[in-house]
Image (spheres, rainbow, N blue to C red):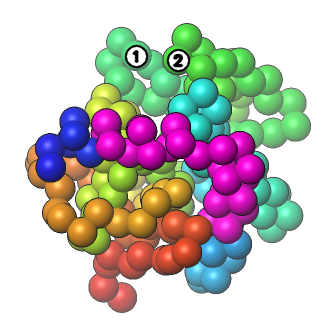
Amino acid sequence: MTKSEIRKKHKALRQELSYDEIENRSLSIANQLLQLDIWNHSFYHIFLPIQEQKEINTEYILNILAGKDKNIVISKSNFEDYTMSHFLLTDNTTLKKNEYNIPEPIDGIPILPQQIDLVFVPLLAFDTFGNRVGYGKGFYDRFLSGYRPETLKIGLSFFEAETEEFEVSENDIKLDYCITPNEIYKFFKG
């Protein structure tokens, strides 16, 4: 399957999910994360969901991070050059949806990509080799290319892995893990 075919398939699968299924699967993903030994870092980057796209509700993960007193980092997208700037999420952070319904900080304390220890990566689909398919703009691949090599990349998916390997480009960044409601996929050796 091509990336565009995979996008189409997984967008359709997502649209079939009810609100209750989204909440239940999102909570299961957060509970799966608690099984991983990933909580000894300082800066955790997380995406805020586009509700209209039926993305994973990351509020459960945000609550875990806040409960563990971690530094939470969120992004603001620049659609002119497909880059992101990153900000510390604080009690004073004001969020506003952009034209694509992505909740973003209006401003805040800037964080450099090199400061981030772990990134929760949004995706539409992934395969058993750690490749992911997103919306196709390359925001996360650009962002992850500027991180430290030891930065963990954890995909979050409502659905299990595609068994057929995706087409990949040289700019695609592989995941270290992908978490689904029922399974933890590990892609790196260690």
- x, y percentage for residue 54? 58, 38
Q: Which residues are magenta?
A: 7-30
Helix, strand or loop status at disc 1 = loop
Residue 100: mark: 2
Disc 1 versus disc 2: distance between alpha carbons?
Answer: 10 Å
Whether residue 107 is visible: no
Q: Nearer the viewer, residue 131 or 143?
A: 131
Q: Nearer the viewer, residue 70 or 5?
A: 5
Residue at 86% in and 30% down: 92
- x, y percentage for residue 72? 69, 49
Residue contact at pointers 1 and 2, CB within 8 angstroms: yes
**Residue 134 placement, left or right of 2:** right
Q: Nearer the viewer, residue 75 or 19?
A: 19
Q: Residues within 10 Å of mark 2 (few under 14, many from 20)?
A: few
Residue 79: mark: 1
Residue at 74% in and 24% down: 95
Residue at 74% in and 50% down: 20
Q: Residues within 10 Å of mark 1 (few under 14, many from 20)?
A: few
Please state which amino acid type lies under the numbered disc 2: Tyr
Whether residue 81 is visible: yes
Helix, strand or loop status at disc 2 = loop
What secondary structure prevails in the magenta region? helix
Residue 121: mark: none
Which comes before the other along the chain, label 1 or label 2?
A: 1
Residue 59, compared with residue 15, is above or below; it is below
Residue at 64% in and 60% down: 25
| Residue 126 covered by magenta stretch | no
- x, y percentage for residue 175? 35, 63
**Residue 156 placement, left or right of 132:** right
Q: Quadrant of the C terminus?
A: bottom left
